[in-house]
Amino acid sequence: IDLLGGINHDEGSMTLGTIVKDPNHVTLADFQNAFKSMELLGFHNVNVPKVTEHYLKGVNTSSPAALRIALTALFSDINFICPTYLFAKRFAQTVKESQRVYFYELLYASKYFANETWCDLTTMGICHMQDHPFVWGLPLRYPNNYSSDDNYFSKYVMKMWTTFAKTGHMDSDWPQLLNDEPMGAPKVHGLDPKDLRLVLNDPFHETCDGVWADYFL
């Protein structure tokens, strides 16, 4: 089979309220205690020193905002981004040129839908579920609630999904994750109506490959 996988940039931000008392005032103790929450979620035997070193590298640990960003990145990666990406990458390595594998990262959200789903774009980024209005055509059904960019982007996303479902192909702006250049770095399509040709070169090298590959694979 051909494969299309993807994630939202800040998938884990909506889970912060379940692991810290106040997401707006994250402390270093909150970050350290997050590993206990990982255990409860089924993530056992995490290399705590390695993970802590990576996500707190260069972070002002006295800044609640900086710690919130770091903790969001951590929970986005372990819960959503890295399992999805590493599966797609391993699949691409296995099938080689016999199948097509594409991967995207959603970098845009509708302000209206984000507000309706309690996703503060300023502090939470591109939350989980923010792809829904574009996939299901909500800007076309309820145009008064959405911007012209939302409308345009929804048409693009719906065409993207239906084209892939019918043919297993994406258009020429989409590189395959690995197979376009077998010896090259992975390529991920950045989904943003401001630049529909955006290609991200190996964006998960330090996180998914560097921190989590040994854990998940």
Image (cartoon, rainbow, N blue to C red):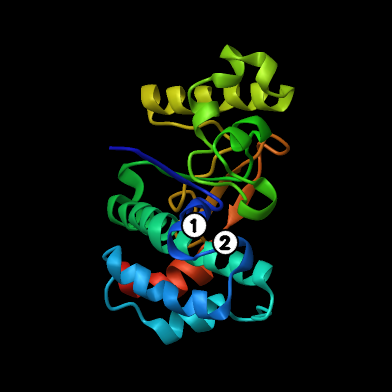
Q: What residue lies at 53% left-to-right and 20% top-to-bottom?
A: 137
- Say how many tags the image has: 2
Q: Nearer the viewer, residue 112 or 105?
A: 112
Q: Is residue 7 left or right of residue 146?
A: left
Where is residue 21 drawn, in percent x and y?
50, 65
Q: What residue lies at 49% left-to-right and 27% top-to-bottom?
A: 135
Marking on residue 40: none
Three-letter amino acid code at the position of disc 1: Gly
The quadrant in which the C terminus is found is: bottom left
Residue 135 visible from this viewpoint? yes
- Answer above or below: position of 211 versus 159: below
Q: Secondary structure at mark 1?
A: helix
- Answer above or below: position of 13 versus 129: below
Residue 217 visible from this viewpoint? no
Contact flag, marks 1 and 2 (Cβ < 8 Å): yes
Find the distance from the CA under tag 1 to the CA under tag 2: 6 Å
Mark toward the start of the polypeptide (1 vs 2):
1
> Disc 2 designates what residue?
23
Q: Secondary structure at mark 2?
A: helix
Where is residue 181 drawn, in percent x and y?
49, 54
Residue furthest out toward the bottom: 49
Q: What residue lies at 64% left-to-right and 46% top-to-bottom?
A: 120
Q: Nearer the viewer, residue 153 or 2?
A: 153
Where is residue 56 drawn, in percent x and y?
58, 79
Where is residue 66 drawn, in percent x and y?
66, 70
Q: Nearer the viewer, residue 80 or 192?
A: 80
The quadrant in which the N terminus is found is: top left
> Disc 1 designates what residue?
17
Three-letter amino acid code at the position of disc 2: Pro
